[in-house]
Image (cartoon, rainbow, N blue to C red):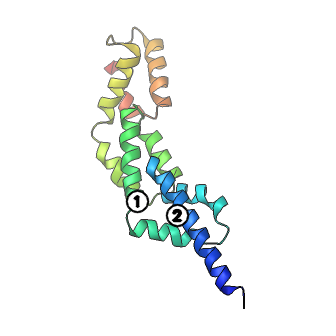
Amino acid sequence: MEDSPIRAIADARAFHALRERAYRLLARREYSCFELRRKLTPHDGHGQLDLLLDSLVSEDSLSDRRFADQLGRSRYRAGKGPRLLEQELRRHRLEEDIVQEVMSQYRESWRDLAAEVRQKRFGTAPPEDYRAWAKQARFLQQRGFTADEIGSYDEA
């Protein structure tokens, strides 16, 4: 019983150190709750991580929605397709409504982005033959675009 005040002080210091580490990470970029938990788990010797994450969410320092929006913008600007973006959002274990909301923001523009990415890589001229088209289609598939966004050989 004598060590309970000492333990309370140690717990408070550990919580403060964990909070400082979380803020240093969040100062650099947005994190999902899942990702921040994974990064902080090795430093949580006193079992206070859940309390910290709840605190960060309640004060809006940590937001899965904000993280997902940032990730969506970043991947879209980088020319990544919807399959790649959706896969990455799910890898961060975001709630389904957040994933669908982010995906819906770009739903109307994936085809235009695919055309832009293709043009940036292969130029403005359409593919000369089926072999050239297939090469371009594979490139776009690797970037996460679907067959609908890539289009058919007849459209090229």
Toward the viewer: 142 or 8? 8
Q: Which residue is mark 1?
A: 63
> From mark 2 to mark 1, how far is it between C-alphas?
16 Å
On residue 74, which mark appears?
none
Residue furthest top as drawn: 128
Position above or below: 47 against 113: below
Toward the viewer: 91 or 4? 4
Which residue type carries mark 2?
Answer: Arg
Q: Residue at x 40, y 61 (%)?
A: 61
- Residue 113 percent across, percent down from the top left: 33, 30
Q: Residue at x 38, y 46 (%)?
A: 70
Looking at the image, do the residues carrying marks 2 and 1 touch, with CB atoms under 8 Å apart?
no
Q: Is residue 144 visible?
A: yes
User: Which of label 2 and label 1 is nearer to you?
Assistant: 2
Q: Residues within 10 Å of mark 1 (few under 14, many from 20)?
A: some
Residue furthest left as drawn: 108
Element on which disc 2 rests: helix
Position above or below: 9 against 90: below
For the N terminus, give its image quadrant.
bottom right
Which residue type carries mark 1?
Answer: Ser
- Residue 73 percent across, percent down from the top left: 35, 41
Toward the viewer: 36 or 5? 5
Q: Residues within 10 Å of mark 2 (few under 14, many from 20)?
A: some
Residue furthest right as drawn: 2
For the C terminus, give its image quadrant.
top left
- Residue 12 percent across, percent down from the top left: 58, 74
Q: Residue at x 57, y 69 (%)?
A: 15
Q: Is residue 30 visible?
A: no
- Ranked by sequence position, the earlier of labels 2 and 1 is 2
Q: Residue at x 59, y 55 (%)?
A: 39
Q: Which residue is mark 2?
A: 19
Element on which disc 1 rests: loop
